[in-house]
Image (cartoon, helix red, strand yellow):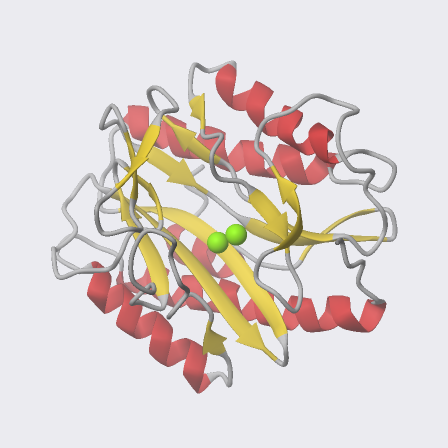
């Protein structure tokens, strides 16, 4: 069941997502070699709660293990998504995808950014650049009258053209009062296929792109998804609302880019 949102609901969705953007901005300030993902998690948890919201990932049940123990997912290098924060210090040249969810005034924020730790190889930077570009191409395709497959096609063709893998098993999703609502928003597809996009459709678009093959596996912790070939993966996510015919981006990378500069 797809719930199209009203103007008022879109504004509430925006507030929850702007808080995610600000949280990612706070995280950008501390990312450097030596910092642990537990430190990132702690900062995010405090910042989200200080701003009157709840971190939505904490306690989410898994069909493969216990509830998610942390407030953000931190996925390092060959971890694609759902990495559990720990006490291992990040190293120069690592990448870390921080996926953050908030619940504020009954609505959900959901956005992810892949950060560089110190100086990262050009090869990895290219992966990040392409993944981020594909996110914005997907967003551009999310207009009223198009179909969900147009979004997937835009992401997939951009990434596969450069030889990268597009993860199939995990997708974007509808978002609103629930963190995950219908429809699923795959990062692959064909133009003109899938559900028709209407004004009021609110979705998270989130390409998960691998440097090597697209095959993944789930760790025995029941959460962490890894690339099977051990190559790095990138993940960028925005929540958008289809508003006045086109995609209005609810979340924000502005705060991150203020700190990081526009690396790509
Ligand atoms: Mg997310
Ligand atoms: Mg999401």
Which image quadrant is residue 72 in?
bottom left
Q: Quadrant of residue 73?
A: bottom left
Residue at (71, 37) in percent of width and height: 140
In the picture, measured across the screen, residue 251 lies left or right of residue 23, that is right
Residue at 50 percent across and 22 percent down: it is 159
Q: Residue furthest front?
A: 63
The x and y percentages for residue 63 are 38, 53
Counting from the top left corner in percent of width and height, residue 212 is at 33, 20
Q: Is residue 143 above or below residue 49?
A: above
At which x and y percent is residue 129? 45, 32
> Which quadrant would residue 8 be assigned to in this image?
bottom right
Quadrant of the snapshot with the N terminus:
bottom right
Query: Is 150 or 30 nearer to us in this picture?
Result: 150
Q: Which residue is drawn at 22% across and 39% down?
A: 119
Residue 9 lies, with reference to residue 239, above or below; the image says: below
> Where is residue 42 shown, x and y percent of the image?
27, 73
Query: Which is more toward the observer, 156 or 221?
Result: 221
């Amino acid at each position: 069941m797809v719930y199209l949102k009203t103007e008022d609901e879109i504004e509430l969705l925006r507030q929850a997502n702007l808080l995610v953007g600000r949280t990612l901005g706070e995280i950008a300030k501390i990312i450097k070699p030596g910092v642990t993902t537990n430190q990132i998690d702690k900062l995010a948890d405090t910042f989200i709660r200080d701003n009157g919201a709840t971190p939505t990932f904490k306690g989410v049940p898994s069909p493969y293990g216990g509830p998610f123990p942390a407030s953000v997912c931190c996925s390092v290098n060959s971890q694609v998504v759902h990495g559990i924060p720990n006490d291992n210090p990040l190293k120069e040249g690592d990448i870390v995808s921080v996926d953050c969810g908030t619940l504020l005034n009954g609505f959900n924020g959901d956005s992810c950014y892949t950060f560089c730790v110190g100086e990262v190889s050009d090869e990895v930077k290219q992966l990040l650049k392409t993944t981020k570009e594909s996110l914005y191409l997907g967003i551009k395709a999310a207009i009223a009258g198009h179909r969900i497959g147009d979004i997937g096609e835009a992401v997939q063709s951009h990434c596969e053209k450069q030889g990268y893998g597009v993860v199939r098993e995990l997708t974007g999703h509808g978002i609103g009062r629930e963190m995950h609502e219908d429809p699923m928003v795959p990062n692959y597809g064909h133009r003109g296929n899938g559900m028709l996009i209407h004004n009021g459709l609110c979705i998270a678009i989130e390409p998960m792109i691998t440097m090597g093959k697209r095959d993944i596996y789930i760790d025995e912790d029941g959460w962490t998804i890894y690339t099977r070939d051990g190559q790095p993966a990138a993940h960028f996510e925005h929540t958008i609302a289809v508003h006045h015919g086109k995609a209005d981006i609810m979340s924000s990378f502005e705060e991150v880019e203020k700190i990081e500069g526009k690396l790509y």
